[in-house]
Amino acid sequence: MRRMILVALGAAVLAAAQAAGEDYAFMPKGGRALLFELLDGDAAELARIAQARRSEAQWREFADVRGKVLTERERATLAAYLAVYMPLPEASLAALPPDGRDLAWNQCQSCHSLFTSHLMQDRDAQAWRNMFESPFHRGIKMSAQEREEFARYSALNMPMKADDVPPELRF
C-alpha cells in the first residue's frame, strides 16, 4: 500500500513539475527538474533518495551512475540541490522543495525584472547569499535552505546569454 501511494505521489509530482516548467523552459533546469528526469518517475527510488544524506561530492557521483547523460553544470546543479535539501521528512515527498529556477522565477519578478536582476548577473554563491542581506531582500519569504539553494543554483547557472532569453523578458 505504501509503495502504491509513493508511486502515485511521484507521478503526480513529476507531472506538476513538467507542467510548471513550460513557462520558463529557457532557463537552465534546477535540481528538482533534473532529479525527476534522472529518475524517470520512479517513486520508490525518489523515496530512497529523499531519505539519504550525502555530501555534495557524493551526490555528484550518484548523478554520474544513474545512466543518463547530464552536463557537468547539470550534475553540479543536481548535487547542490540534493546536498541542500536531503534528507527530507517522509511527509515532504508529495511536494519536493523548489529548486533555484523555481525560486528565481517565483520570487524575483515580484519587484523587478528577472532579466537584469538575475539572469544577467555573474556572481559566486557567496555574492548571491550576500544579496539577501540588503534591506530590500531581507523580507523575501524564503527559508534558509531555499536561500542556499537559490545561491548555489544561481552561481552555477548564471549569467545566461541575452539571446537565450525570450525577447519579451529582456527588460
Image (spheres, rainbow, N blue to C red):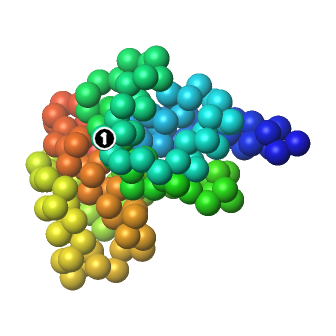
Q: Nearer the viewer, residue 54 or 124?
A: 54
* Residue ID at (47%, 43%): 32
Residue 93 drawn at (x, y percent): 64, 51
The residue to which callout 1 is attached is 57
In this rendering, the answer to whether 34 lies above or below 54 is above
* Residue ID at (59%, 25%): 40
* Residue ID at (58%, 50%): 51
Residue 166 drawn at (x, y percent): 29, 35
Q: Secondary structure at mark 1?
A: helix
Residue 171 drawn at (x, y percent): 20, 50
| Number of other residues with Cα within 10 Å of mark 1, as a class: few under 14, some 14 to 19, many 20 or more | few
Quadrant in the rendering for residue 108: bottom left
**Amino acid identity at mark 1:** Ala
Quadrant in the rendering for residue 130: bottom left
Q: Nearer the viewer, residue 163 or 82?
A: 82
In this rendering, the answer to whether 96 lies above or below 45 is below
Relative to 10, 75 lies left or right: left
Q: Residue furthest right?
A: 1
Q: Nearer the viewer, residue 99 or 140?
A: 99
> Is residue 109 in view from this perspective?
no
Relative to 112, 87 lies left or right: right
> Is residue 10 in view from this perspective?
yes
* Residue ID at (34%, 64%): 147
Residue 67 drawn at (x, y percent): 46, 17
Q: Quadrant of the N terminus?
A: top right
